[in-house]
Amino acid sequence: MVEKKRAFITGATGQDGSYLCELLLEKGYQVFGLQRRASLPNTARIDHLYEDTENPDFVMLYGDLADSSNLFRIINKVKPHEIYNLGAQSHVGISFDKAEYTANIDALGPLRLLEIIRNVDFPIRFYQACSSEMFGKVLETPQKETTPFNPQSPYGASKVFAFNVTKQYRTGYGLFASNGILFNHESPRRGVNFVTRKITLGLSRVKLGLQPLLRLGNLDAKRDWGFSKDYVEAIWRILQHKEPGDFVIATGETHTVREFVEEVAHNLDMSLTWKGKGMEERGIDTKTGKTIIEVDPRYFRPNEVDMLLGDSSKARKVLKWKPKVTFKKLAALMTEEDFAYAEREAILHNTIANQRKFMSYGLQNGKNSSQRKTRRAKN
């Protein structure tokens, strides 16, 4: 009987982690995922994988990238053939407020894993999730594997450390350690505080009257947006390649936040036009005459990254990978999912409102009835 490959995935409960769990299970792996202990459930993206509670091929383990002894015990017990380090504090904006924590998890977390791999007595292939944010204020366009890094955030700087230390353990200790430099990749599973989900869910709520408008930051920021499910296929291919290396994963197209807003508005049958400039710019739905987009200075970062555009020629040639989902299709599928989500919110909102109205009516009637009884008693 052929032994199943075992994969250990940090960040298994996140967007990429959940898609990667699905992919590896489909390919016959035994998958072990790492999740942080929390007082509230944080497994919504992978709950469907628990449907078969007798499935021995999917196991979630409690742990933390800040705890090296915990990581060592898990790795020594699981003895994975492959480790995919997707765990991170992954929000660029939040990294300015939680700089030390971001560095501890995003920079030192990979180092802890690499030290463990170096010291165990069985071979492990290691994948490190890096980011286009490492390029920051770009020094050349498009950005490829040899483009110099120029990060503009604690998140980007932490990922540069992770990239370099992964490369150093590869060359210095002969580990099979690879970096994937993934440009922005989105999906309906993206966190709601990321700009794409903020737009698709926010405009869906505006459409249904659940919120008056959507506030955004830099509308002119350009990003290379792809689909997360496409990108985890590239992640897997990186560790199946005969030699370790570094790979840019990107679509090769760049679009502004403004374009993403326009695409989502179009999918929601909103007729969007822009008025004003700079911080006074507003997006107006011409069908209703209402302002549905406002620019809010709170969402601008201390250091802005204006444009990212990836050159994934190496991955396309060496890994035989290419993205399947276009920018328009990505916006459409995210909008469809979030509009359905907002519709469920609207139903719940209306149900609660009706219940409150009924209760208020009942209390008022009870009060009136009591007052009538008091008057009759006096008479």
Image (cartoon, helix red, strand yellow):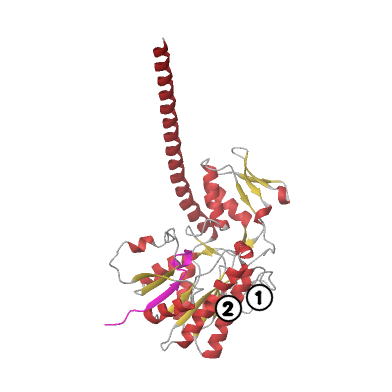
Q: Quadrant of the N terminus?
A: bottom left
Q: Which residues are magenta?
A: 1-17
Q: Residue 236 placed where, x, y %?
A: 45, 75
Q: Which residue is mark 2?
A: 163
Amino acid of disc 1: Phe
Q: Secondary structure at mark 1?
A: loop
Q: Is residue 379 magenta?
A: no
Magenta span contains residue 2: yes
Res. 89 mark: none
Q: Is residue 165 among what the camera can see?
A: yes
Q: Which residue appears at 65% of the width and 55% of the height?
A: 299
Is residue 277 positioned above or below 349 on the image? below
Could you say which disc has been placed on residue 149 in the image?
1
Which of these two is toward me, 361 or 53? 361
Residue at the location (67% across, 60% down)? 301
Q: CA distance from mark 1 to mark 2?
A: 10 Å
